[in-house]
Amino acid sequence: MTGTVITVAPTGAESKKVDVPALPVTLAELVATAKECEALGASIIHVHIRDDDASPTLDQGRLRDTVAGLRESTGLIVQLSSGGSVHDPEADRLAVLDAAPEMASCTMGTVNFGDDVFLNRWEFIVDLHTRMQERGIVPEYEIFDLGQLTSLQRLLGKHGLPFGGHVHVDLVMGVPGGMPGTAAALVACEQAIRDLPEGTTFSATGIGRGTLPVMLASLATGGHLRVGMEDTLTYAKGRPVESNMQLVARAVGFAQLAQRPPLTAAQARELLGVPA
Ligand code: KMH
Ligand code: ZN
């Protein structure tokens, strides 16, 4: 398949609604964003949810309502974040899988995260991977640094392929403490991905100023794209992002220019082994 899977990550756990009013934090805002992004060409939504105060939460009832709401209103592949915020305990992060998403993220190692630490112990990673295998949830392996691709190779060697048999990774580049958001770093990752099972696909996102170089390098090397206000709050110098749709529309334009137009959600499901 020569097209591009475009994932929208509309909310994240780091930005505050008071600082970024366009951030979708209620279920209604999230569903409206999801519908518009799907119409533009997104095929996956990477979801972090908020509570009534717009603070990050992994509340089980809200997670279930979110999966149901997005499934009812869109055809997007719903991918819940098991990363949560840097403050979430492991038990709550594992319990995200109880909300039965079609996909969930699985970060492949511990990384400094600005002034914080995003902790991902090996035993925790194995637990997430194994539970997703058992429950028929397709993982997206989040890679914040090059060595985490080697950890993924080790995970798959010791504990087997994910549910569906297809391996998909997402390069999250430019986090302060992780790999830089540069074309050179992306190419290094793309080379390392060749050591993973044949057919492994990757998407990439560059945080902040890494947004454009990472997007262009990913398209140039056969990768897919993740965009959204989880990662990018500045559209261009001096221009704050107005909406997630603005970022998806730009990604769609670049993908079309690269002659790798956006894949529909149905096509993305086929590519990634996510049941319809
Ligand atoms: N919020 C970050 C600490 C994921 O969604 O799996 C973790 C994160 C990764 O965003
Ligand atoms: Zn996330």
Image (cartoon, grey):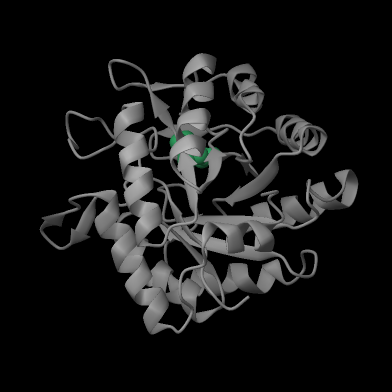
Q: Total label count? A: 0
Whether residue 276 is visible here, answered yes or no, is yes
Q: Identify whether 238 is placed above or below 275.
A: below
Residue 11 location in percent, x, y?
35, 38
The N terminus lies in quadrant: bottom right
Q: Quadrant of residue 183?
A: bottom left
Q: Quadrant of residue 252?
A: bottom left
Residue 128 location in percent, x, y?
72, 33
Q: Nearer the viewer, residue 117 or 212?
A: 212
Name the residue at 54% across, 62% down: 203
Q: Taking 95 as reference, is 252 left or right?
A: left
Residue 174 location in percent, x, y?
41, 55
Name the residue at 55% across, 79% down: 221
Q: Nearer the viewer, residue 206 or 53?
A: 53
Q: Taking 143 as reference, is 46 left or right?
A: left
Name the residue at 46% across, 75% down: 261
Residue 18 location in percent, x, y?
17, 28
Whether residue 230 is visible here, answered yes or no, is no
Residue at the far front in the pictured view = 72
